[in-house]
Image (cartoon, rainbow, N blue to C red):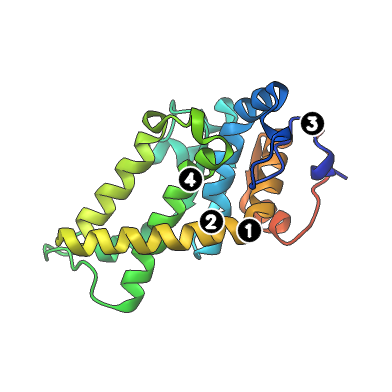
Amino acid sequence: MTKYNNTPLVFTARTKTDDNYEPSNWIRREILKPQYHEAGHAVVARLTGFRVEWVSIDPAFIDNNAIAIENMCTGFGPVCMTISSDRLNPIVNPIGGLPRRGIRTKEDRETIIGYVIHVLAGPYVEREIDSASFDRTVCERDFGQVAMILSLAEPNRSARKKLLNVAHRRLNKMLDDHWASIQNVARALHIHRTLFGHQIDAIMSGVELPEAA
């Protein structure tokens, strides 16, 4: 069985200490940033009720996966494939020639906030690992997704800002409460390179995956 807390190249603490900032640990953090970034997406997607098909840092898997090809996610590096269209489309896409409906109900609002939270989770986790070296430009695709969905769902700029503030507060609380799950998924992703949805759920519930072949 894979003991994630004994895996090499592990960055273990959300609370920063001097030991975590030794040069060797800086190298570890740099190596593990993609794994932590995608683990952030995956764990928070599950916590906000979105289905995760898979998460991968393996270009060969991503570039040949039918869902990744259909969603134009190939050629961009690591991917967390979250299934969200069934919940988002009724809110942000015009249906039957009618205008998009936008946010009308509390459920709509929670769907949009949950989506924003899970997309921002990757950059937030990456920044948490090392704020000094965090490069926002690397995460522009995530920030662009958030801006697009918010603009489609809510035309009022002030209301969009309120939604973003709620997402920010909830996400920080989730990182505090579920950092161990993010670590464990990141470690498993480092070992296995691709994790499927049921494996992510298992890791989050405390199950250790079999050793990689």
N-terminal of the two: label 2 or label 1? Answer: 2
Q: Which residue is mark 2?
A: 44
In the displayed structure, 53 sits above or below 62; it is below
Question: Are circles 4 and 2 on residues that touch, CB within 8 Å?
Answer: no
Q: Which of the two discs, 4 and 1, labels the residue nearer the N terminus?
A: 4
- Asked if 78 appears above or below 94 in the picture, the reply is above
- Residue matched to label 3: 8
| Alpha carbon separation for disc pair 4 and 2 | 11 Å
Q: Position of residue 171 (x, y in %)?
A: 48, 58
Which kind of residue does numbered mark 1 sit on? His
Looking at the image, can residue 11 be seen?
A: yes
What amino acid does circle 4 point to?
A: Tyr
Residue 99 percent across, percent down from the top left: 12, 64
Whole-angstrom CA distance, mark 3 to mark 1, is 21 Å
The circle on residue 124 is: 4
Farthest front residue? 18
First in sequence: mark 4 vs mark 2? 2
Residue 178, numbered label: 1
Nearer to us: label 4 or label 2: 4
Q: CA distance from mark 4 to mark 1?
A: 13 Å
* Element class at badge 4: helix
* Quarter assignment of residue 130: top right
Image position, residue 184 (x, y; %): 71, 47
Query: Relative to the observer, which residue lies in front, 57 or 21?
Result: 21
